[in-house]
Image (cartoon, rainbow, N blue to C red):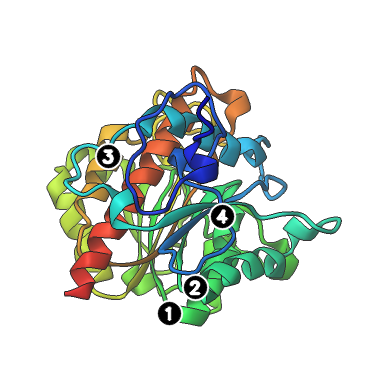
Amino acid sequence: MSTWDNAITGTPGTGAVNSHSFGGAVSFFRTPFGRDLTGIDVAVMGIPLDIAVTNRSGARLGPRAIRNASMSLAWERPWPWKTDPLQALKVVDYGDCENKSGGGLTSVKHIEGWVDQILDAGAAALLLGGDHFISYPSLRAHFKKHGKISLIHFDAHTDTWPSSGEGINHGTMFYQAAKEGIVDPATSIQIGIRTTNDDTLGYEIASATDVHEQSIAATVKRVRERVGNNPVYITFDIDCLDPAFAPGTGTPVPGGLSSFQALSIIRGLVGINLIGMDVVEVAPAYDHAEMTALAGAQIAIELLALYAECRAAHAL
């Protein structure tokens, strides 16, 4: 009788695992669970938070849904990448940011501290949300290590509505990050925007209409020119995708990107100075046939593939 299960007994860096998709421990792409980050390149951590939403809750179950959907994709490297990110990188599923004391997950410093643990160990972080608020404590942690950050932000919303102090929610954190000097709007870009916010704070807007009317290559060129060689954090709110591709989210907006458009843009960013990433706002209660969770899982593994390629390019 075999006792093999890669999530439990696997070794980071050994590549995609061709195992059954319908059983076994549910980890991110069957990567082994682990809290020891010695020699680890990337830690995947869920942040099951949805109390900072302004519409429908449910994204606290997003990390679990993304992991579950990833099981059916885990048998080979993501197409069309030539490098298997799970072989090029030593990746562990770090589990979830835990709420050890009542209200802990509502604290910026609590989540920031969990991301600090990963970065201080020398690993990069891929975070699974959770609502989009989680990007703010993550950016604070990354700023301490890398300095001012250029943001590539996929979303239907700018998330730059005014806020202050404890008033931060999932629609205000990039206002706060800009005002605190964590993010540099002059070298940042927001992709897929299709809601009204007249004050851009200096962020460049590549609206959903821009993406639809321009070529993918033109959009990629625009993004690359904007961020240059600055430290880049990619945040992907799943509502960047049209509800036809991602119905399971808290604040869906018609007219969004297709999954093909979004993935093609990500694939075109090889060579940027990528330092961190997250995928947020998957809310499985509103999903159908795991469409949104599947899109979130695919985006997450492609971000890992992008990170592997960018890391290799900057090591030359």
Q: Are marks 3 and 4 in contact (CB under 8 Å)?
A: no
Which residue is more in the foreground, 236 or 55?
A: 236
* Residue 78 rendering spot, x and y as whole percentages: 27, 39
* Residue depth check, mark 1 versus mark 4: number of the one nearer the observer: 4
Sequence-wise, the earlier of marks 1 and 4 is 4
Which residue is more in the foreground, 22 or 57?
A: 22
**Residue reaching furthest front?**
1
Q: CA distance from mark 1 to mark 4?
A: 25 Å
* Residue depth check, mark 4 versus mark 2: number of the one nearer the observer: 4
- Give, as a three-letter code, the residue at label 3: Arg
* Residue 209 rendering spot, x and y as whole percentages: 28, 40
- Give, as a three-letter code, the residue at label 1: His
Where does label 4 land, which residue?
34
Sequence-wise, the earlier of marks 4 and 2 is 4
Check the image and report above or below for 247 versus 134. Answer: above
Where does label 1 land, which residue?
146
Q: Residue at x 22, y 56 (%)?
A: 269
Sequence-wise, the earlier of marks 1 and 3 is 3
Q: Residue at x 49, y 73 (%)?
A: 142
Which residue is more in the foreground, 233 or 21?
A: 21
Q: Which of the 4 quarters of the picture holds residue 112?
A: bottom right
- Give, as a three-letter code, the residue at label 2: His
In what element is the residue under mark 1? Answer: helix
Check the image and report above or below for 40 versus 70. Answer: below
Q: In the image, 211: left or right of 128?
A: left
Q: In the image, 22: left or right of 81?
A: right
The crowd level at tag 2 (other Cα within 10 Å; few <14, some 14-19, many 20+) is many
In what element is the residue under mark 3? Answer: loop
Which residue is more in the foreground, 224 or 212?
A: 224
Where does label 3 land, which residue?
77
